[in-house]
């Protein structure tokens, strides 16, 4: 206990001395040099200090500074202090370098995080990792005479170790003798020209050894097919081959062949032809596509004139066919091109209403032109600006509505059509006065004058004599094609007795024409003539030149029958009549002629 009090007294005394030294201005100031080792206080060992505890590190040493440690005297509490030095106490940080492989040494660097300012670093060698071998696998199968090979791969770098080998399993023969099959098989196949052989094969699955001592197989001979691969073209000779189906390697037989000749299509129009041209091409494609074609020029009638008449100026119709380069055909034709020239002549004329009693009298007619078709709805609208027809709808499939004949017109309407058409074409026609009504249609009454033939060069209605002369076209039979009524369906649209008109009008020009190229002279619609109707034709008229009929009357003559009449009424000779101012019938149409002035 007294030692403890003595030690405590010493500590207090030292503390007072130090306090006095710090507060005394006359005490010289002690200069501490930087980075000097700390002074170790003098250890007082009066008590002997033989009983110290464990060292306790108070400051760790680094690669740059010393550390310190201390321990206490258990007897008196005295503290003993020591300096700790450790220049190797770096704090290393590994940095990038060259990694090692299974067989190559790598390299790397490390730096101390405490003394990096002095660039303290170190270079390390990284030992190889060595291979990490996997299990053995079979890479070469054993045969009857050779062992197989097994290999193993490094899972780290992929290196293969192929130095390991093993005996074939199962090892069929230690001396390389094959185990042959018991039965003979074909070991060398025979060809058409070469013999083959039979033998036995080794039964080991990976062995392809076989013997040929089992017998000879005779050559098979050729197995021929048909002649093929003809090289001839349409115009040049060639050759063809006969190959063996059993042995393709054998040279085939050959023989010369003649030129094949062209295989032509039907005559067609295509994108390279016009309405007046067509061509046909060769369709042969073996051995190469033939490019041969033939062309021909067509008559003008091959144009499609089913288009509309022009609505102003002279009447012109444009072909509606799509021709070369898929463009519209530019060909046009005038109304005059649809007029048929009727040469003048003489015709015997009957003198009774049945026309069965032909007299000895004949009429003489001058030349004139007649329209090959009945006036169509399109032509009537182009001239008159209106369409009075009853049949404006319900056209038969495949036919054109505008090409059906105009109907439900009066005789006066037909006359005014001729007048307007003539004016439009620059011709002179009838004179019409006292028109009723003054404007509009139908015209129910008017005064119509046939002007002097010397100046009459325009369009008009045909006289009855002209109509029959043109219809007969030189014949004296019941119909202009003969006397057989069964043939009428091919030439006329009519009703009962074999007709196919089905009680309506049809597009003009679809039936066969007469010998002079005039269509629908029988059937479809009844056609007005210029003449006044008189039941008995006067003998004076029968003997006249270019007769125009009676000078007056009640009805105007109609000829040709119509769509609902039977075959008997649709005869060439049959006469009909109708009031000129009545338009209530959809049976009434007309056809025009172009007058050719008679020189006086």
Image: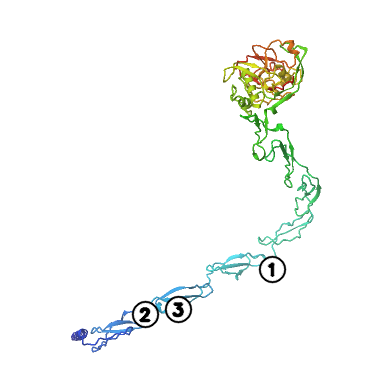
The residue mark sitting in front, 1 or 3, is 3
The residue mark sitting in front, 2 or 1, is 2
| Tag 2 and tag 1, C-beta contact below 8 Å | no
Question: How many numbered markers are drawn?
Answer: 3
Q: Where's residue 40, x and y in %?
A: 29, 86
Q: Is residue 4 visible?
A: no
Q: Report, in whole angstroms, how far the alpha carbon at label 3 lies from the one at label 2.
A: 17 Å
Secondary structure beneath dot 3 equals: strand
Label disc, if present, on residue 62 of the rendered structure: 2
| Of 268 and 221, the residue lying toward us | 268
| Of 433 and 74, the residue lying toward us | 433
Instruction: Name above or below for residue 62 compared with residue 181.
Output: below
Secondary structure beneath dot 2 equals: loop
Q: Report, in whole angstroms, how far the alpha carbon at label 2 lies from the one at label 1.
A: 77 Å
Secondary structure beneath dot 1 equals: loop
What residue is shown with label 1?
175
What residue is shown with label 3?
122
Q: Residue at x 61, y 29 (%)?
A: 312
Q: Quadrant of the N terminus?
A: bottom left
Q: Where's residue 462, x and y in %?
A: 69, 19
| Of 78 and 555, the residue lying toward us | 555
Q: Is residue 570 visible?
A: yes
Counting other residues with Cα less than 10 Å from the Cα at mark 1, is it few (<14), some (14-19), or many (20 or more)? few
Q: Quadrant of the C terminus?
A: top right
Q: Report, in whole angstroms, how far the alpha carbon at label 1 lies from the one at label 3.
A: 64 Å
């Amino acid at each position: 206990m007294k030692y403890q009090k003595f030690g405590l007294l010493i500590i207090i005394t030292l503390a007072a001395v130090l306090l006095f030294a710090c507060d005394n201005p006359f005490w010289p100031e002690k200069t501490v040099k930087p980075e000097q080792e700390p002074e170790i206080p003098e250890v007082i060992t009066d008590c002997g200090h033989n009983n110290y505890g464990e060292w306790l590190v108070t400051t760790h040493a680094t690669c740059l500074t010393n550390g310190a440690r201390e321990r206490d005297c258990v007897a008196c509490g005295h503290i003993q202090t020591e300096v700790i030095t450790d220049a190797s106490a770096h704090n290393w940080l590994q940095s990038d370098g060259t990694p090692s492989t299974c067989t190559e040494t790598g390299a790397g660097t490390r730096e101390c995080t405490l003394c990096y300012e002095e660039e303290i670093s170190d270079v390390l060698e990284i030992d190889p990792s060595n291979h990490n071998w996997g299990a053995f696998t079979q890479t070469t199968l054993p045969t009857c005479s050779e062992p197989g090979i097994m290999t193993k791969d490094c899972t780290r770098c992929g290196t293969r170790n192929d130095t390991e080998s093993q005996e074939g399993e199962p090892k069929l023969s230690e001396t390389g003798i094959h185990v042959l099959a018991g039965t003979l098989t074909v070991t060398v196949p025979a060809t058409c020209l070469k013999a083959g052989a039979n033998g036995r094969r080794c039964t080991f699955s990976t062995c392809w050894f076989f013997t040929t001592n089992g017998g000879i197989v005779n050559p098979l001979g050729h197995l021929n097919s048909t002649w093929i691969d003809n090289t001839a073209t349409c115009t040049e000779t060639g050759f063809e081959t006969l190959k063996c189906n059993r042995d393709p390697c054998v040279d085939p037989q050959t023989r010369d062949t003649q030129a094949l000749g062209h295989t032509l299509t039907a005559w067609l129009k295509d994108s390279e032809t016009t309405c007046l041209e067509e061509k046909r091409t060769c369709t042969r494609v073996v051995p190469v596509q033939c490019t041969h074609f033939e062309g021909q020029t067509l008559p003008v009638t091959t144009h499609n004139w089913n288009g509309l008449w022009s609505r102003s100026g002279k009447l012109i119709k444009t072909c509606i066919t799509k021709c070369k380069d898929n463009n519209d055909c530019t060909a046009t034709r005038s109304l005059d091109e649809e007029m048929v020239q009727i040469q003048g002549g003489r015709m015997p004329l009957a003198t009774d209403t049945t026309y069965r009693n032909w007299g000895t009298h004949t009429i003489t007619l001058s030349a004139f032109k007649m329209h090959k078709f009945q006036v169509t709805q399109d032509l009537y609208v182009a001239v008159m600006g209106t369409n009075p027809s009853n049949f404006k709808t319900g056209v038969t499939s495949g036919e054109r509505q505008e090409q059906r004949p105009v109907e439900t017109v009066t005789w006066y309407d037909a006359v005014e059509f001729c007048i307007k058409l003539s004016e439009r074409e620059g011709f002179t026609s009838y004179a019409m006065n006292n028109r009723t009504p003054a404007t509009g249609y139908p015209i129910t009454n008017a005064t119509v004058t046939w002007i002097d033939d010397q100046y009459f060069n325009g369009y008009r209605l045909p006289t009855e004599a002209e109509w029959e002369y043109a219809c007969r076209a030189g014949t004296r039979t019941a119909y202009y094609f003969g006397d057989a009524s069964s043939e009428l369906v091919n030439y006329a649209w009519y009703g009962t007795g074999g007709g196919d008109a089905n009680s309506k009008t049809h597009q003009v020009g679809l039936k066969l024409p007469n010998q002079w190229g005039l269509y629908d002279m029988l059937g479809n619609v009844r056609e007005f003539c210029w003449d006044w109707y008189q039941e008995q034709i006067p003998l004076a008229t029968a003997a006249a030149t270019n007769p125009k009929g009676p000078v007056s009357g009640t009805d105007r003559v109609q000829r040709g029958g119509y769509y609902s009449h039977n075959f008997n009424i649709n005869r060439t000779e049959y006469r009909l009549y109708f009031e000129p101012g009545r338009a209530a019938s959809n049976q009434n149409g007309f056809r025009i002629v172009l007058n050719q002035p008679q020189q006086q």
